[in-house]
Amino acid sequence: MKETIIFDVRKMTGDAVEWPELKSAATLLMAGGTVAFPTETVYGLGANALDAMAIESIYSAKGRPSDNPLIVHISSRDMLTALVSSISETAVRLMDAFWPGPMTLIFKKLPIVPDKVTGGLDTVAVRMPSHDVARALIDLSALPIAAPSANISGRPSPTTAEHVINDLMGRVDGIVLGDNAAVGLESTVIDTTGDIPVILRPGAITEAMIAAVAGACETDAALKASKGEQVVPRAPGMKYRHYAPNAEVTVFTGDTIGILKQFENAVEEASAGDYKIAILLFSEDLAVLNRLLAGNTAHVVLFDQGSVKDPAVFASRLFRDLRASDDCGCKRVLVHGMAEDGIGSAIMNRLLKASEGSVIRI
Ligand code: TXA
Ligand code: MG
């Protein structure tokens, strides 16, 4: 067990680079320590990207396979030029449009980036976050910060300070407690080393947004491959079972009335078997399901994912509610899915992984 120092900045106001807590957290990073911190996507677990020993501590704290490369976080374009050997015109356009923000770009790396960060690849993933705490920490340490999501490997990514404490207390040197992650899903990862940008992991910056800026955009074939097809994803992290709670997850897409009927049946089975289930559904469908259940609610926990008209709310609550389903002792989690467009692509990508492909079309 490590002694984990807590830096609570939730009540701080004003310019984050002036906060003594962040100055201390930055000192830990400069000394080769591991520090978890909030970003706009999910919480990250950071360490000096140029220090192979510090990177080693990230992998061991998370229990993460070391062939799964990390994203390097920067706060200025100057930091980028010190890490990569070339920056394509497409990359410049994307950076101008979406940095700082929930977008990670893949570049050819310079030798200064340790192989431990890139899992031996000749490319490096770089992101400039928009969160003021993340940026202040990078500025104060004056270091590029390698940071995967701050969860135990395989669990849903952390979107609240509490999630990080639950996963990493005693395993890392410091935790910065901040606000809940606004986006709630990890950044869009885009390969910019070829002529056309390729999405390796979908996120809040969507295919249409990228195509509008870059003229074209493709998505890694492995992400679209149906179950059973063997295509190896180009982002090594996408091949692992991921984002998963302990409960068994099933996703339903298609006709809403049919889906609600399935939910009703599952609740009946749960009460007959005397176990609990969780259901994640749109606000519009909550009242309808409650009518169908007619008071039979002792074995079900309902999670409101916001309006069907605003799937960004669904995105921001998904990981939180998957974790909460485990906390309630639910044996199964049933989710009302959605079409794979816009941010729906990212949501369905995470759900496909959490359910290990258990997606039922009604
Ligand atoms: O929003 C985010 O991206 C968060 C916050 C903390 O910034 N970070 C995050 O990191 O999600 P992580 O380690 O959980 O996911 C990194 C993803 C993995 O799928 C990894 O395989 C991919 O990026 N990746 C990293 N370097 C790569 C590279 N050189 N080539 C291809 N994929 C890469
Ligand atoms: Mg992760």
Image (spheres, rainbow, N blue to C red):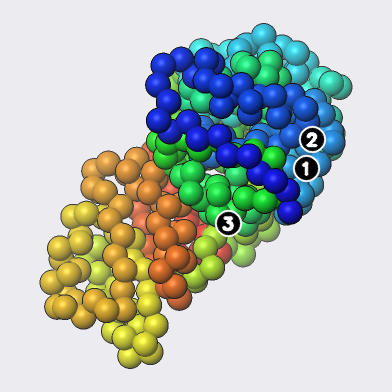
Q: Residues within 10 Å of mark 1 (few under 14, many from 20)?
A: some
Q: Earlier in the sequence, mark 3 or mark 1?
A: 1
Taking depth in this image into account, of 106 and 65 the one nearest to the observer is 65
Q: In the rendering, at what x and y percent does residue 32 appear?
A: 78, 31
Apparent side of residue 175 relative to residue 210 in the rendered image (left or right): right
Which residue does the numbered mark 1 point to in the structure image?
57
Which residue does the numbered mark 3 point to in the structure image?
155
Residue 349 visible in this rendered orientation of the protein: no
Q: In the rendering, at what x and y percent does residue 136 appear?
A: 56, 19
- Name the amino acid, label 1: Ser
Apparent side of residue 362 relative to residue 285 in the rendered image (left or right): right
Q: Residues within 10 Å of mark 3 (few under 14, many from 20)?
A: many
Q: In the rendering, at what x and y percent does residue 121 appear?
A: 81, 35
Q: Secondary structure at mark 3?
A: loop
Give the CA separation, mark 3 to mark 2: 22 Å
Q: Residues within 10 Å of mark 2 (few under 14, many from 20)?
A: many
Which residue is at 49% across, 71% downward?
248
Taking depth in this image into account, of 85 and 215 the one nearest to the observer is 85
- Name the amino acid, label 3: Arg
Give the CA separation, mark 1 to mark 2: 5 Å
Residue 186 to residue 337: above or below: above
Q: Secondary structure at mark 2?
A: helix
Which residue does the numbered mark 2 point to in the structure image?
54
Beta carbon of the mark 3 residue lies under 8 A of ligand 2: no
Disc number for residue 38: none
- Name the amino acid, label 2: Ala
Mark 1 and 2 residues: CB-CB less than 8 Å, in contact?
yes
